[in-house]
Amino acid sequence: MTTTATKRAATGSLFGLALGDALGFPTEFNDVPAILAKTGPWRQMRLPRPAIVTDDTQMTLALARGMRTAADRGPLTPEGLAGPVREEYTAWYRSPENNRAPGNTCLRACSLLTDPGRDWRDASQIGSKGCGANMRVAPIGLVPGWTEEERAGAAQLQSALTHGHPTALAASDLTARAVWLLADGAEVTGLVGLLRSYALDNRTRYHERWLGDLWMRTACDAGPQSFIARGWDDCLAALDRLAAALKTPSPETDPCLTTGEGWIAEEALATALQCFLLFPDEPLTALRRAACTSGDSDSLACLAGAFAGAHLGAAAWPEDWTTRIEYREDLDTFATLWDA
């Protein structure tokens, strides 16, 4: 398999994520006819000037900073990761730059997390499976050296700090897994099958070391395995819809019609994957398809960019786009660290 260093997968994925975010920012909350009226043909969509991103990229960078701090302090542990990531999420919450239509779940949870005496599990929004948890999880699929258990646990933990619904946990884990597989050189034709196998293998695995008794905050009284299985079942159903859509691909049709609008976690994963897999070797087309949708366009394009960049590496994106993106220096810092 191609190594991440050879193709600079972290650079490709992080910049792709931010570019998709910026491309989809002006089209979010618009239907497709309104987007086309604004931008012209979707295959010719241009990166806005200035190329401003949303909370999707901001929170991705917050997670990345928390991960770096945890690594600087020693071997990875759940407590060692939760503390720094919590600090970064609350710093984002308090930042004057947090003015990009952030999600209500993130705002509610981060407001509660600002109380230093509160257990993070008591801040987690157990009822929310919004896409705010897996839109930011790509760094966990890119950082080198972690075990499969560490990636899975960390992906679910970073989700649970704000979105504690089992589907948010599973979708975050699965999104990070997709990024890792693509960065590691997995064949795109087998990607959906690999993700489905991973979901089935982990369907009843509750990461107690990372999540503690989070599951007990819910009305589920059948045990932690039953709790987490609900989330994986939602993701498996979304992967089945994705597989069906890819059997009869329709690139000119809004992908939200087959795999969902992306406001919730499993739909964001499935629809972003559809946009990427329709155009696995045309990364800008994949971004444009995701940005010209009736759903959560910035998050869909953000994830499609993360997948395309992990697959193709730094060469996926034109220099006149990457040099204009907001937070370019921050993105480059983590890309260089993880590609080294």
Image (cartoon, helix red, strand yellow):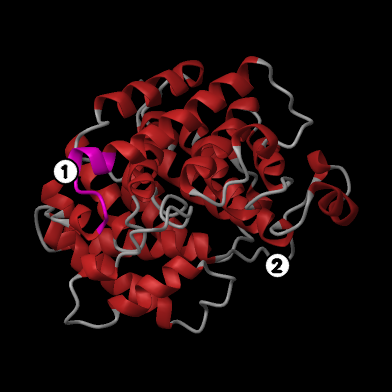
- For residue 322, say whether it is visible: no
Q: Left or right: 174 with respect to 305?
A: left
In this view, 237 is above or below 36? above
What amino acid does circle 2 point to?
Pro
Residue under the point 19% across and 48% down: 221
Question: Which quadrant is the N terminus positioned in?
Answer: top left
| Residue 228 drawn above or below residue 216 | above
Using a 10 Å C-alpha cutoff, classify the residue at mark 1 as few (fewer than 14 neighbours), some (14 to 19) or many (20 or more): few
Q: Is residue 164 left or right of residue 311?
A: left
Q: Position of residue 256 (x, y in %)?
A: 66, 39
Asked whether 102 or 331 is in front, the reply is: 102
Q: Is residue 253 visible?
A: yes
Q: Secondary structure at mark 1?
A: loop
Which residue: 44% across, 73% down?
107
Total of numbered circles in the picture? 2
In the image, taking residue 138 as reference, residue 96 lies left or right, namely right
Residue at x-position 71% and y-position 39%? 289
Q: Nearer the viewer, residue 245 or 287?
A: 245
x and y percentages locating residue 128 in the rendered image: 42, 58
Mark seen at residue 223: 1
Q: Give the residue number, with chain letter if any, for mark 2.
A: 50
Q: Quadrant of the C terminus?
A: top left
| Amino acid type shown at disc 1 | Gly
Range of magenta residues? 218-228
How many neighbours does mark 2 have within 10 angstroms: few (below 14), some (14-19), or many (20 or more)? few
**Marked residue nearer the N-terminal end (2 or 1):** 2
Q: Is residue 118 magenta?
A: no
